[in-house]
């Protein structure tokens, strides 16, 4: 007698909810303490969940893609645009066409309007913090 195949069950969630779930799976990561407030998003988890590693090289993330600029050079690219690295990173996430690093094509990077301000800040901290965004 054959067993009837059971349909697979899937839950559709937002990218932000998925990134939080990923962060919560890692020991010592995710929300610290609970409640709400700044700093609750995990930049490393967001970097992976949003697909950044598929286009950008970034040593801290172990990525070596070459579609977009190398994020290890973020501070130098920010300087070319006359901006502080954190300001430059946030602007690049929200409006990638505001400044396109020479040698890369405009319109390749999507906007990430669905990210909350806390999530953008977490990504910025991840990109510009220790081990990333070197000068």
Image (cartoon, rainbow, N blue to C red):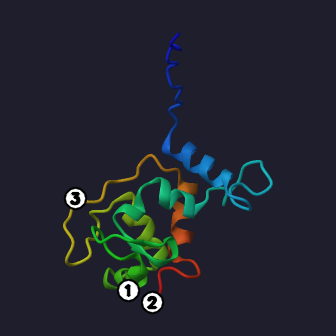
Screen quadrant of the C terminus: bottom left
Residue at coordinates 73% horizontally, 59% vertically from top-left? Answer: 27
Q: Which mark is residue 54?
A: none
Locate residue 85 relative to residue 66 in the image: left or right: right
Q: Give me the disc on residue 107.
A: 3
The residue tagged 2 is 135
Horizontal and vertical percent position of residue 125: 56, 70
> Disc 2 to disc 1, how far (Cα)?
6 Å
Mark found first going from the N terminus, 2 or 3: 3
Report whether 5 appears left or right of 68. Answer: right
Element at label 1: helix
The reply to whether the C-beta atoms of the residues labelled 2 and 1 are less than 8 Å apart is yes
Rounded to the nearest whole Å, what is the CA distance between mark 2 and mark 3? Answer: 26 Å
Note whether 48 is above or below 56 in the view shown.
above
Q: Earlier in the sequence, mark 1 or mark 3?
A: 1
Nearest the eye: 69 or 27? 27
Residue 52 vertical placement versus 128 (above, below): above
Residue named by callout 1: 76
Residue 8, image x, y percentages? 51, 25
Tell me the quarter of the picture where residue 95 sits. Answer: bottom left
Q: Foreground residue, 41 or 58?
A: 58
């Amino acid at each position: 007698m054959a067993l009837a195949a059971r349909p697979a069950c899937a839950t559709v969630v937002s990218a932000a909810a998925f990134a939080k779930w990923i962060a919560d799976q890692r020991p010592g990561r995710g929300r610290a303490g609970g409640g709400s407030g700044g700093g609750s998003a995990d930049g490393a988890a967001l970097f992976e969940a949003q697909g950044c590693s598929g286009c950008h090289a970034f040593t801290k993330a172990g990525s070596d893609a070459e579609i977009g600029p190398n994020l290890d050079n973020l501070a130098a690219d920010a300087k070319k645009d006359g901006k502080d690295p954190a300001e430059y990173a946030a602007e690049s996430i929200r409006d990638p066409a505001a400044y396109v690093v020479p040698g890369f094509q405009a319109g390749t990077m999507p906007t990430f309007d669905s990210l909350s301000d806390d999530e953008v800040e977490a990504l910025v901290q991840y990109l510009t913090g220790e081990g990333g965004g070197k000068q």
